[in-house]
Amino acid sequence: MDSQIHFELNTSKVINTMPYGVTFSYFCLHVGLTKNFKTMEESEKINSKKIIINYGLILGIVSVLLGVISYVMGNLYQPHWSMQVLGFIILIAVIIYGINEFKKTNGGFLKLSQALKIGVGIAVVSAVIGILYFIIQVNFIEPNYFENYIDFQREAAFQANPSVTQEQVDAGLEFSKPFMNTGFFVVIQFAMALFFGLIISLIAGLVMKKQNPYQA
């Protein structure tokens, strides 16, 4: 946009010094370039929106499938470390692939701001899908989710430290009870999606960025 403004200022300085025929040709060229700038900007918005939605849906659906697998395997309250690692690898791969797809459709050029927009956007769409699944899960699939989660934490505390007393465990669980609700879990899930989406897209953007020499 700055380059377009600079171009317009330059034309205003020289247009009065040109013969009529040259001025008219120059005006036509200016109008054509202006339309091209606007078309490129509109195309970029369409491409980025499409990529964010498509890859966000893919990441969200895959994340839900991993959650379903953990539920079926009986690891709802403590997913196996391999599932957590796999989920994180998929998160990185989908965001990077989405950014790269935008770069290809943008003529091979990529700004850091564009990479951040794509990466964070994908993570947010995925988080919304994951949150919807979580709400369905705790209200319909596992209505006693939070009660069962507290019991799971109690057993885990005794296994981790057999010498701990019942009073100590109950005191710790009593402190965490205000956070055992859907709203708190939703906020945490959304915040984590924003954080990891930002970090991954920032690193990918720094590595993959390529400035268009015809744009500021």
Image: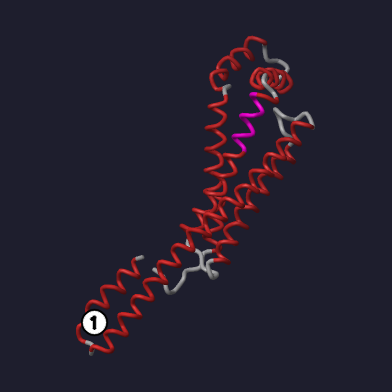
Q: Is residue 139 above or below residue 110?
A: above
User: Residue 7 appears at what percent x and percent y?
Assistant: 31, 74
Q: Position of residue 191 (x, y in %)?
A: 52, 38
User: Is residue 128 magenta-colored?
Assistant: no
**Residue type at numbered disc 1:** Ile
Q: Please give the name of the residue rendered at 42% of the width and 72% of the height, measured from the top-left corner.
A: 36
Side of 200 relative to 62 (left or right) = left
Name above or below for residue 56 compared with residue 80. Answer: below
Left or right: residue 184 versus residue 68 is: left
Q: Quadrant of the N terminus?
A: bottom left
Total labels drawn: 1
In this rendering, would 75 be left or right of 169? right
Q: Nearer the viewer, residue 128 or 167?
A: 128
Q: Which residue is mark 1?
A: 15
The residue stretch that appears in magenta: 130-139
State whether residue 182 is above or below residue 189: above
Query: Which residue lies at the image location 57% right of the left edge and 50% below the top edge?
Result: 53
Q: Could you say which quadrant of the image residue 180 lies in?
A: top right
Residue drawn at (57%, 49%), measured in percent from left and top? 122
